[in-house]
């Protein structure tokens, strides 16, 4: 309803912005946390690195407690601390800040490039025999990444190529990222779409109106099990029943090879207020019990392909994911 820019000039403001979802979406959370640590160093009074080190790690801890599921947060913080570990005790403040900012900017730039590559690889999935009807969930665009987007990046590329017949946007209960953010981005880009209730998706599939579902990810386990916004799993189940392709789009920074399968992914539980209230207005009887998991885990067996910056990974995902991460490491690219 309103575009407002929040200036985050200290670590605590950055942390609260992530906790309260001013900044949300896995890649955007990671980039923002990295800049949070750089700002933390810039604001601190110290002459040499040795006098700031403990404070740096206190900031690191504060940021890593903001949200538990999106692995990009931990990955970006680790990139920052890996740089800090190279600092000599006597490194000057100016040099510390310069080097931390360089890593944060590199993470940010890399994320935009990565999203554009994901968009191109997603386009390669289109056979050109006929236009596509695509359904997406949550917000995975410029408001969830450094820019362009993952699943929404693919939708942008498909639109540019004239490949889209229809886009359906799930409203994404309860926080309404589809209603509020994806609708905003698609409208701004002039990409035609229809906003639907989450519960309409299966019906549209049963009517033969959906060719693909494409979603983002918050954490992808070593076996391909994928945590993403609550409601993603039921979309994938519906896709299998209706023989609709189900694609995940994510940078390699969203993969977590140290998590063997989806059952090891921590799922954030959020406040009941997101369910009992609509835009601050109480709509449920007060005092009732609620359960509000913010994410669910889609088993790898329901996923047709995972679109990354290196191309489309196919089942068996344990092998294709390990191979992609090895390539990325060998090329010195950003990767867990
Ligand atoms: O709770 P949110 O809004 O941070 O959840 C976001 C999602 O689940 C996105 O689909 C995911 O982070 C991918 S964003 C490119």
Image (spheres, helix red, strand yellow):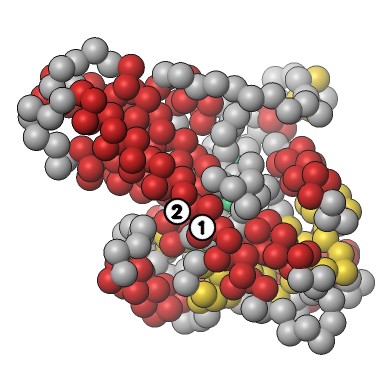
Of 325 and 171, nearer the camera is 325
| Rendering coords of residue 55 (x, y %) | 23, 21
- Determine which of the numbered discs, if any, sits on residue 113 in the image: 1
Q: CA distance from mark 1 to mark 2?
A: 5 Å
User: Can residue 142 be seen?
Assistant: yes
Q: Is residue 55 left or right of residue 316?
A: left
Q: Residue at x 88, y 75 (%)?
A: 208
Residue at the far top in the pictured view: 45
- Determine which of the numbered discs, if any, sits on residue 198 in the image: none
> Badge 2 is on which residue?
110
| Rendering coords of residue 144 (x, y %) | 60, 44
Q: Residue at x 63, y 52 (%)?
A: 148
Q: Tag 1: Cα neighbours inside 10 Å, few (<14), some, or many (≥20)?
A: some
Secondary structure under tag 1 reads: helix
Where, by quadrant of the figure, is residue 157 drawn? bottom right
Q: Are marks 1 and 2 in contact (CB under 8 Å)?
A: yes
| Rendering coords of residue 265 (x, y %) | 44, 53
């Amino acid at each position: 309803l309103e575009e407002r820019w929040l200036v985050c000039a200290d670590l605590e403001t950055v942390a609260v912005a992530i906790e309260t979802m001013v900044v949300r979406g896995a890649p955007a959370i990671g980039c923002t946390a990295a800049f949070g640590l750089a700002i933390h160093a810039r604001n601190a009074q110290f002459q040499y690195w040795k006098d700031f080190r403990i404070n740096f790690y206190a900031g690191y801890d504060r940021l890593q407690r903001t949200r538990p599921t999106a692995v990009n947060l931990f990955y970006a913080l680790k990139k920052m601390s890996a740089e800090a570990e190279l600092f000599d005790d006597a490194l000057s403040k100016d040099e510390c800040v310069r080097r931390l900012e360089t890593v944060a900017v590199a993470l940010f730039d890399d994320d935009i490039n990565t999203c554009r590559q994901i968009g191109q690889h997603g386009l390669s999935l289109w056979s050109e025999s006929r236009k596509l009807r695509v359904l997406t969930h949550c917000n995975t665009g410029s408001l969830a990444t450094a820019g362009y987007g993952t699943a929404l990046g693919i939708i942008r590329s498909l639109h540019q190529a004239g490949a889209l017949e229809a886009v359906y946007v799930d409203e994404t209960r309860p926080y309404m990222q589809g209603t509020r953010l994806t609708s905003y981005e698609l409208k701004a880009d002039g990409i035609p779409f229809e906003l639907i209730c989450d519960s309409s998706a299966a019906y549209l599939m049963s009517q033969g109106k959906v060719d693909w579902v494409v979603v983002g990810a918050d954490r992808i386990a070593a076996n391909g099990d994928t945590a993403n916004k609550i409601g993603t799993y039921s979309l994938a189940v519906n896709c299998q029943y209706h023989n609709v392709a189900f694609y995940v789009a994510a940078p390699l920074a969203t993969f977590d090879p140290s998590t063997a399968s989806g059952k090891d992914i921590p799922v954030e539980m959020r406040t009941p207020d997101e369910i009992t209230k609509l835009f601050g207005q109480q709509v449920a009887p007060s005092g009732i019990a609620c359960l509000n998991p913010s994410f669910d885990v889609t088993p790898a067996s329901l996923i047709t392909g995972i679109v990354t910056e290196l191309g489309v990974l196919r089942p068996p995902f344990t092998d294709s994911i390990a191979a992609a991460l090895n390539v990325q490491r060998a090329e010195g690219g950003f990767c867990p």
